[in-house]
């Protein structure tokens, strides 16, 4: 399974692509950070992010997309930009006809480090170790995107199966 992970951000948007199977080590395909200029108008920044993510989805042809779920922050301006970038990432996956899954930061931390409270340094160290990289991916946005992709490889299949079973149960089916 090839997964494109996105750590959304309006100024810096991390993108990581990995291949793997649940219970097996993942392999790095690529990682990027898409930058937008804070001096540009919002529509131009979102358009640049959309074109960049759409291009990366087309280039890497993932089986699915994993995006960090926006959570409440004290800085409303920051959370708004993150939410807008997240929407663009979800749209890029959906436009390509791919399944898109969102994960909270604590879900990703727990999947990758075993602790939902891990800090950035612990996350980067584990991503480096899990992908057997000679050096940590920089900046942290790239490491976070790779962590999202790893989390989806390891947890996404289970999550999808549970959702499908719940849908069948609601419809009264057993298959």
Image: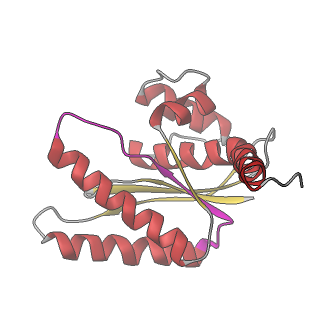
The picture quadrant where one finds residue 81 is bottom left
Q: Position of residue 69 (x, y in %)?
A: 43, 46
Q: Quadrant of the C terminus?
A: bottom right
Q: Position of residue 4 (x, y in %)?
A: 58, 60
The magenta-colored residue range is 60-75
Residue drawn at the location 20% of the way across and 46% of the way down: 78
- Give the residue furthest to the front: 172
Residue drawn at the location 75% of the way across and 43% of the way down: 158
Whether 64 is among the magenta residues is yes
Is residue 139 visible in the rendered image? The answer is no
Q: Is residue 134 above or below residue 100?
A: above
Whether 67 is among the magenta residues is yes
Residue drawn at the location 64% of the way across and 58% of the way down: 3
Q: Quadrant of the N terminus?
A: bottom right
Residue drawn at the location 47% of the way across and 21% of the way down: 117
**Horizontal side, residue 61 vs residue 7: left or right:** right
Q: Nearer the viewer, residue 171 or 81?
A: 171
Q: Position of residue 102 (x, y in %)?
A: 52, 50
Is residue 13 visible in the rendered image? The answer is yes
Main secondary structure along the magenta-highlighted residues:
loop
Q: Nearer the viewer, residue 60 or 159?
A: 159
Q: Position of residue 52 (x, y in %)?
A: 40, 74
Q: Is residue 113 above or below residue 162?
A: above
**Horizontal side, residue 123 vs residue 71: left or right:** right
**Horizontal side, residue 26 vs residue 150: left or right:** right
Q: Is residue 35 above or below residue 23?
A: below
The type of colouring in the image is: secondary structure
């Amino acid at each position: 399974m090839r997964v494109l992970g996105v750590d959304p951000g309006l100024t810096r948007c991390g993108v990581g692509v990995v291949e793997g199977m649940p219970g097996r080590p993942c392999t790095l395909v690529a990682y990027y950070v898409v930058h937008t200029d804070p001096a540009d108008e919002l529509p131009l920044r979102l358009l640049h992010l959309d074109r960049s993510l759409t291009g990366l989805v087309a280039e890497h042809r993932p089986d699915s997309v994993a995006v960090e779920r926006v959570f409440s922050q004290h800085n409303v301006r920051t959370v708004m930009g993150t939410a807008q970038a997240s929407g663009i990432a979800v749209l890029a996956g959906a436009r390509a006809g791919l399944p898109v899954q969102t994960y909270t930061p604590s879900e990703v931390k727990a999947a990758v480090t075993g602790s939902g409270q891990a800090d950035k340094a612990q996350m980067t160290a584990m991503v480096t170790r899990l992908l057997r990289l000679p050096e940590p991916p920089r900046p942290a946005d790239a490491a976070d995107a790779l962590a999202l992709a790893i989390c989806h490889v390891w947890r996404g299949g289970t999550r999808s199966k549970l959702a499908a079973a719940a849908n069948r149960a609601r419809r009264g089916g057993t298959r």
